Image: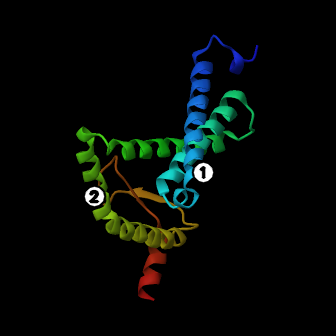
Amino acid sequence: MDKSWNLATGEFWIRNLLILGSAYLGVFEGIQISRDPKGYWFDVYNFMNLSDVLLNILICLSYGYGMMNFTTQTLYLLIAANVFLCWTNCFYWMRFFETTSRYTRMIIASIGKIRDFLFVQLLFIFTFGFSLYFLSKGTDRVEEENPSGGEDEVFIYEPHFVNGVANALFN
């Protein structure tokens, strides 16, 4: 008997419960779309809810029943996106409870305040990382003894990389 249809396993019941729960939430998303179609598509959290429902069903059908032939890497990518959406929805709903709303709003305010810094930080990382990648392309690592004389320490440098940086800066 195929393992995916074995009623004795807990995996079967959990998987089907997840599919039914996601379908139930999908019905509510459909009701929201039918009541206010224009307003539904302009809220980011509605997209997150709808994609969470679809990803849950898609992953359960693909992994559990093998109905869709995804590669393992694609399935892992879908699962990672689904976990991210579930955590985001969890933090979104935590703001409605009195005991957690204060902390959730503090986290949201902190992220909002450091957003500009993170953007500049990523810009620097991508800018300098990109140029350093091309400067170090095709270089060999050279190991020499440490100039300070330590026996078990090895001094590693890349001569072509150093020369490339010097040429780029001074010529």
10 Å neighbourhood of mark 2: few (<14), some, or many (≥20)?
few
Outermost residue toward the top? 8
Sequence order check: which comes first, mark 2 or mark 1?
1
Quarter the C terminus occupies: bottom left
Does residue 142 appear to the left or right of 26 in the view shown?
A: left
User: Which residue is under mark 1?
Assistant: 34
Q: Residue 136 location in percent, x, y? A: 51, 68
Q: Residue 27 location in percent, x, y? A: 59, 39
- SS type, badge 1: helix
Query: Is residue 160 shown to the viewer in this render?
Result: no
Work out whether residue 28 or residue 46 is closer to the camera in this orientation and state it: 28
Q: Is residue 83 above or below residue 19?
A: below
Outermost residue toward the bottom? 171
At label 2, which amino acid type do we have?
Ala
Q: Residue 111 location in percent, x, y? A: 31, 58
Between the C-alphas of marks 2 and 1, the distance is 33 Å
Residue 95 is drawn in which quadrant? top left
Residue drawn at (60%, 51%) of the image: 34
Q: Which of label 2 and label 1 is nearer to you? A: 1
Residue 60 is drawn in which quadrant? top right
User: Which residue is under mark 2?
Assistant: 109
Does residue 108 appear to the left or right of 124 in the view shown?
A: left
> In this figure, what is the number of numbered marks?
2
Residue drawn at (40%, 41%) of the image: 90
Q: Give the number of the disc on residue 126.
A: none
